């Protein structure tokens, strides 16, 4: 996995792509109990020209979420971090992971997608149900 086209080829062979743009693809990850989680893969480039793959999944609106809890979550996580993006003009939490291509192979990409998709679904359920475990 040294470029986005290799990622697109692998993911396209495993999942039906919902979005298929030059540097952004998305699909629905099937989870247990008939649940699904949207997964987004995008290419990022830093100021030195190094390229990264961002794997992200939306988990819920930012409104009503305590920012200190989000930062505490980020501090405790080994994989994934919470970030905010706009969704139709409203702030929305995403669970993300950025990986340099040179450290990414097919097995690692599949593992990250499964892990972030499952954790994202759990967080989404907590947020939607107003739980206190987040």
Image (cartoon, rainbow, N blue to C red):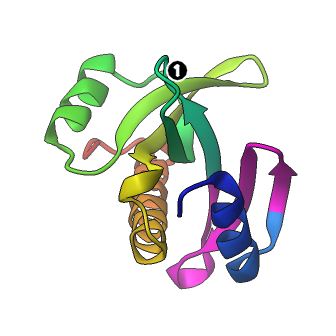
Q: Position of residue 91 (x, y in %)?
A: 60, 20
Residue 59, given in percent of the width and then of the height, sits at 52, 44
Position of residue 88 in the picture relative to residue 82 (left or right) = right
Quarter occupied by residue 11: bottom right
Q: Secondary structure at mark 1?
A: loop
* 47 displayed left or right of 37: left
- Front residue of this view, candidates 115 and 6: 6
Q: Residue at x 44, y 69 (%)?
A: 105
4 versus 50 height, above or below: below
Is residue 35 covered in magenta? yes
Tell me where residue 7 sits by quadrant: bottom right
Tell me where the magenta segment starts and ends, as one range.
18-39
For the stretch drawn in magenta, the main secondary structure is strand
Q: Is residue 49 magenta?
A: no
Residue 86: image location, x then y, percent = 67, 22
Identify the residue at image location x=20%, y=50%.
78
Q: Nearer the viewer, residue 103 or 35?
A: 103
**Percent position (x, y) of residue 21?**
84, 46
């Amino acid at each position: 996995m040294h470029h986005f086209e290799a990622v697109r080829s692998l993911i396209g062979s495993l999942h039906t792509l919902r979005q298929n743009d030059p540097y952004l693809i998305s699909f629905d990850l099937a989870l247990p109990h008939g649940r699904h989680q949207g997964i987004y893969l995008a290419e990022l480039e830093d100021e030195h020209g190094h390229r990264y793959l961002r794997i992200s999944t939306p988990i819920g609106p930012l409104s009503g979420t305590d920012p200190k809890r989000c930062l505490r979550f980020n501090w405790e996580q080994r994989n994934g971090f919470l970030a905010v993006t706009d969704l139709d003009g409203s702030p929305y939490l995403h669970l993300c992971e950025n990986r340099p291509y040179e450290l990414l192979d097919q097995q690692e990409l599949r593992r990250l997608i499964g892990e972030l998709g499952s954790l994202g679904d759990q967080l989404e359920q907590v947020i939607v149900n107003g739980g206190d475990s987040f």
